[in-house]
Every structure is written in structure tokens, then in C-alpha cells.
Amino acid sequence: MNPHMGVTVQMSSSIQKYCSLSVSVVCDRNGVQRPNSLQKFGSCDYVTQLRHPSGCAKVVSLNGGGWGWFGIFLIIILFALGSYVIAGAAYRYFVLHVHGIDAIPNLEFWTSLPHRARSLYAHIEQKIRGPSHVERSTYNPIGF
């Protein structure tokens, strides 16, 4: 069935073998219409059709407004990082009996991270802009 025209829901019984009920929900934007009939096929298979606005397909997003692969990747990285810090702190607290802020694993690395980020930014900025007047050497070149 065309998803823009509606959907078919099929339910099967686990008590009696091969018994089912199929309900086709057909798109009707004008409102709800009751089923006209309930047809029986075979010994215990039933089929009916219901017209309802819920059967109309809704386009959620065409222009990729979701998180995308990079957003999902960032969520996974942040979750892994949080799990690492929590598990490491719990291990250091309960097993190694390290208390206070020292229970955070690799504390020296985490405290040096802002300085490392500033250094990386300055390095990239220097590569893009070139050396500034202040950074130039005070020595004069010798012409041979």
C-alpha cells in the first residue's frame, strides 16, 4: 500500500494458530469514518478498512533539520567521556581511597586543557596570519 494513502496494521493471535485481524487505515483529511464492514476470510481471519486523518503521511523533514551523523557522534563522545570520568573517579575513590578533587582521573591533564587550547589557537592563528611585527627578530639580516 502507498504510505501516502494509508497504512495496514495486521495483528496475529498467539493463542489460536493462523488467526489475524488486518485494519487498513486510509488517509481521509475530512475526518473519521467508521468501518463499513468486517470481512471474514477463512476460519478466523478478519479484514476491515478505517478512514481517518491518522492514515495520512506527514513529512517530518526534507532539508535535514535533524542532528545528523556529526551530532550523534558528539553525543557518543560526550557520553563516553562522562562515563570515563565517573567510572575512573569511582574506582579511585572506592578502590584506591583517593578523596576530594584528586579522585578525578588524570587531573593534571584536565587542568592543563585550557592552556593547551589557548596554545593551539595561538599556533593556528599564527599560521593563518603569519608572524606579527612583535614576534619578528630584532636582529638585522646580513647581506652577503
Image (cartoon, rainbow, N blue to C red):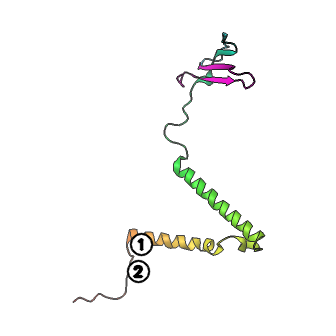
- Secondary structure found at label 1: helix
Could you say which disc has been placed on residue 13 in the image? Answer: none
Q: Residue 43: percent from the left, percent from the top?
A: 69, 13
Q: Nearer the viewer, residue 76 or 119?
A: 76
Asked if residue 109 is positioned above or below residue 71 in the image, the reply reads below
Q: Nearer the viewer, mark 2 or mark 1?
A: 1
User: Which amino acid type is shown beneath numbered disc 1?
Assistant: Gln
Across the whole image, how many numbered discs are drawn on residues? 2
* First of labels 2, 1 by sequence position: 1
Q: Residue at x 38, y 78 (%)?
A: 133
- Secondary structure found at label 2: loop
Q: Nearer the viewer, residue 119 or 27?
A: 27
Q: Can residue 23 be found in the magenta stretch? A: yes
Q: Residue 50: percent from the left, percent from the top?
A: 64, 17
Asked if residue 130 is positioned above or below residue 136 in the image, the reply reads above
Q: Where on the picture, by quarter, is residue 76?
A: bottom right
Q: Where on the picture, by quarter, is residue 66?
A: top right
Q: Residue at x 65, y 15 (%)?
A: 47
Q: Which residue is mark 1?
A: 126
The residues colored magenta run 1-28
C-beta proximity under 8 Å, tags 2 and 1: yes
The answer to whether 121 appears left or right of 143 in the picture is right
Q: Residue most toward the front?
A: 17
Mark pair 2, 1: CA separation: 10 Å
Could you say which disc has been placed on residue 135 in the image? Answer: 2
Q: Quadrant of the C terminus?
A: bottom left
**Mark 2 burial class by Cα count in 10 Å: few <14, some 14-19, many 20+:** few
Asked if residue 74 is positioned above or below residue 23 in the image, the reply reads below
Q: Residue 81: percent from the left, percent from the top?
A: 63, 61
**Mark 1 burial class by Cα count in 10 Å: few <14, some 14-19, many 20+:** few
Q: Residue 120: percent from the left, percent from the top?
A: 49, 71
Q: Residue most toward the left?
A: 144
